Amino acid sequence: MIPGLPVYIIIIFILTVILGALLFINSVKNKKKVSVIIVAWLALQGILAYKGFYQNTSGFPPRFVLAVAPAFIFIILLLLTKRGQAFVHSLDLKKLTLLHIVRLPVEITLYWLAVHKTIPWLMTFEGRNFDIIAGCTAPVIYFVCFSGQQVKNRNVLLAWNFICLGLLLNIIINAVLSAPFSFQQFAFDQPNIAVLYFPFIWLPCFIVMVVLFSHLLTIWRLLKNKKRLS
């Protein structure tokens, strides 16, 4: 763990991860199987981070790749394979839209981490990170764009997902280029080191990936099917 970091930041972040996991699990049909996969992934990454595995940033590619690449590849396979697409079609888009509320406590956590000099200010809503907009607007989109299980404002939902995907990609790029890797471009005075520690490794390896997956599958579903929400 990060030395000297207040316990309340760690607790609130862990609760945020639990909330994100529960909201995602609630959107799938095979809840038991998905729950096991999520718990196993979080446990693996948590142990590696707790042991200090990701704090070694000298190699290329950095060890951090192991925290995000498997999940990203898994997302691509879900979107491109027949079995994966069957799973994608089984997800509840309405519930997945509500999942984005986790981005609000995430932004608050990032602000606290910046205060305690473990991430740069550019990663907060006072800097280049506007992702808080997605978290604040998710409940509005949830109520405005759905009627029961039907999408009633498809264009609004599609536009919101594209915009919020852009917000997510913006902070991902800034976060990666602010980390103490060989290709670092920003924040040399205060690099992004928090995500190399437990439990904050769960931000890139889980929360970011779940949010990214939610946007991609929603956009894919809306473009594939303009009328019905299966």
Image (tube, rainbow, N blue to C red):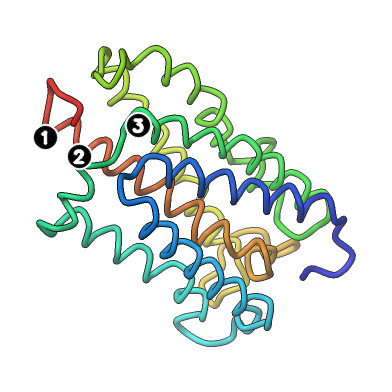
In this rendered view, identify the residue nearer to me: 30 or 124: 30
List the residue tagged with mark 1: 224
Say whether disc 1 or disc 3 marks the residue closer to the N-terminus. 3
Q: What residue is pinned by disc 2?
A: 220
Q: Position of residue 161 (x, y in %)?
A: 35, 31
Type of amino acid at the residue the image marks with label 3: Asn
Give the distance between the C-alpha atoms of the residues marked 3 and 2, in whole angstroms.
11 Å
Crowding at mark 1 (Cα within 10 Å: few <14, some 14-19, many 20+): few
In the image, farthest residue toward the front:
32
Q: Amino acid at mark 1?
A: Lys
Q: Secondary structure at mark 1?
A: helix
Q: Report the residue at 37% width, 25% height from top.
A: 160
Which sits in the foreground, 48 or 19?
Answer: 19
Q: Nearer the viewer, mark 1 or mark 3?
A: 1
Foreground pick, 149 / 55 = 149
Q: CA distance from mark 2 to mark 1?
A: 6 Å
Tell which of 34 and 203 is nearer to you. 34
Q: Secondary structure at mark 3?
A: helix
Q: Position of residue 192 (x, y in %)?
A: 66, 62
The answer to whether residue 103 is left or right of residue 121 is left
Residue 146 image position (x, y, % from top left)? 32, 16
Q: CA distance from mark 1 to mark 3?
A: 15 Å
Residue farthest toward the bottom in the current orientation of the protein: 59
- In which quadrant is the C terminus drawn? top left
121 sits to left or right of 204: right
Q: Dot 2: within a 10 Å radius of its alpha carbon, few (fewer than 14), some, or many (20 or more) residues? A: some
**Amino acid under disc 2:** Trp
Q: Residues within 10 Å of mark 3 (few under 14, many from 20)?
A: many
For the N terminus, which image quadrant?
A: bottom right
Q: Where does label 3 land, which residue?
A: 161
Tell me if 95 is positioned left or right of 184 in this view: left
